[in-house]
Image: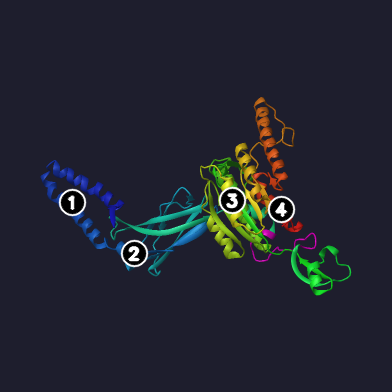
Amino acid sequence: MRFAPGNRLLFLTAVVAVPAMTLVVYDFPTWAVPCLLALASLVGAAVLDLQRTSGHLDRVKLLATDRVRATAGRTLELAFDLSCPDRLATSPLRFGLPVSAAFHAPRGTVLEMPAAYGEPPQRRLLFPLIPLRRGQFAFSEAHLETSSGWGFWLLRRRFPLALECRVYPDLRQERQQVAALFMNRGQLGAHAVRQVGKGREFEKLREYQPGDDYGDIDWKASARKRFPVTRTYQIERTQEIYVILDHSRFSGREIRLPASKLPGEEAASLESQGGEHLVTTQLERFLHCALILAAVAEKQGDRFGMITFADRVGRFLRARNGREHYDVVRDAVYTLEPRPVSPDFEQLMIELRQRLTRRALLVMLVDLSDPLTAEQFLQSLPLISRQHLILVNMVRPAGAFPLFGATPPPVSLGEVYGALGGHFQWSELRATARKLKHLGVEMGLPDQEELTAEVVTQYLTVKRRQLL
């Protein structure tokens, strides 16, 4: 426990001790004895006050949970239980918590706990915080301060903590975009998706009936049974969906969101801080898209898996379904950050070839804006393009539009050069998309706010057309 002089002691020192010492030093005989008595009284009272209350904070116990979960941008309340002795149960307290730059404390980092007369010695404190970004954070210490019995001293104590805070991405905006069907709230909003065709998954053999397609006759079974036998098929109900997420150096490309396009609360918070744009990264959009697609796949009854890679394959989560598996996927990627390395597509394709033996839908979220990276991707893709159905998506780079498209025409020379550079980049991406088309791979180039809706639409189209 530590202690520091309080305002009352400082005030009495300035009013009593300083004048008394001045009179004693300058040798005023008539005032010497009263001054020394005043000094002795002040020192004795301060020492006695410290001795009476010095051990009060040592008997205080601070209880907190080991782990809390929160969502970026939403208010989180950390609960602390203080077990105080009788004398502190009704005393005002000050509680402090060191907070990193990843959090905003709306009420400050030091909270006042007023005196609570008539309450039990167990006191609860709710410490509000607003996480500003996703990730895993730790709170290692907390501080408590109170006044001594006579108010001469401030008693302070440090409490060690082992509190882990997991902050997950905020998916509210994406959930609103893809409608109530994809909201993970029981079966609200769920409806059947119309399937095209008769299905391709074998169900059973039965005796031939008039009107059956000759192409469905199983000739070997017919020869064994000596009468025509027809194969029946059913629509594929459970399929494997894998999201392959690139977190190499290209995934760290900045995306600036104007305040006018943000939800009301976020826009007001950004404007209050004097900002006009919210700066995020392409990886953040990839993560939001992957988690929303996982929720959609769960509603559709499919198995969902996640693969992350940079210069090597990182997380490899086998496709499963259920709420527990969704939580596993979320816990696996919420701390993912861009790595300053180039992607190794050849190693990725070899790993996929060896570990994914069943045909699956692979949704690849990669950045192919660099021509060299796109060329390496095209060279490695044939290893798996015949076995799996592949969808490639990336966020459209800022300004990558056709020169004579729907965007407002440039009005200055600088805008002309900028639009021309964006046209060249758009042309290279379109050329990459055409090369992927020859390999049977579809490439999407949506804007950042449309990425999730575009990927979900592609997934539902695959299910409706039974392309797997």
Closest to the camera, between mark 3 and mark 4, is 3
- Would you place residue 461 above or below residue 29 in this image? below
Q: Which mark identifies residue 101?
A: none
Q: Give whichever of 91, 232 is nearer the camera.
A: 232
Q: CA distance from mark 1 to mark 2?
A: 33 Å
Which residue is identified by label 3? 350
Q: With 87 as the anchor, is 237 left or right in this view?
A: right
Q: Are marks 1 and 2 in contact (CB under 8 Å)?
A: no
Give, as a three-letter code, the residue at label 1: Leu
Which residue is identified by label 1? 39
Mark 2 secondary-structure assignment: loop
Q: CA distance from mark 3 to mark 2?
A: 59 Å
Q: Are marks 3 and 2 in contact (CB under 8 Å)?
A: no
Q: Which mark identifies residue 457?
A: 4
Mark 4 secondary-structure assignment: helix
Precedes in sequence: disc 3 or disc 2: 2
Q: With 71 as the anchor, is 460 left or right in this view?
A: right
Label 2, residues with CA under 10 Å away: few <14, some 14-19, many ≥20: some
Q: CA distance from mark 3 to mark 4?
A: 29 Å
Closest to the camera, between mark 3 and mark 1, is 3
Q: CA distance from mark 3 to mark 1?
A: 84 Å
Please say whether residue 265 is visible from this viewpoint: no
Please say whether residue 124 is visible from this viewpoint: yes
Closest to the camera, between mark 1 and mark 2, is 2
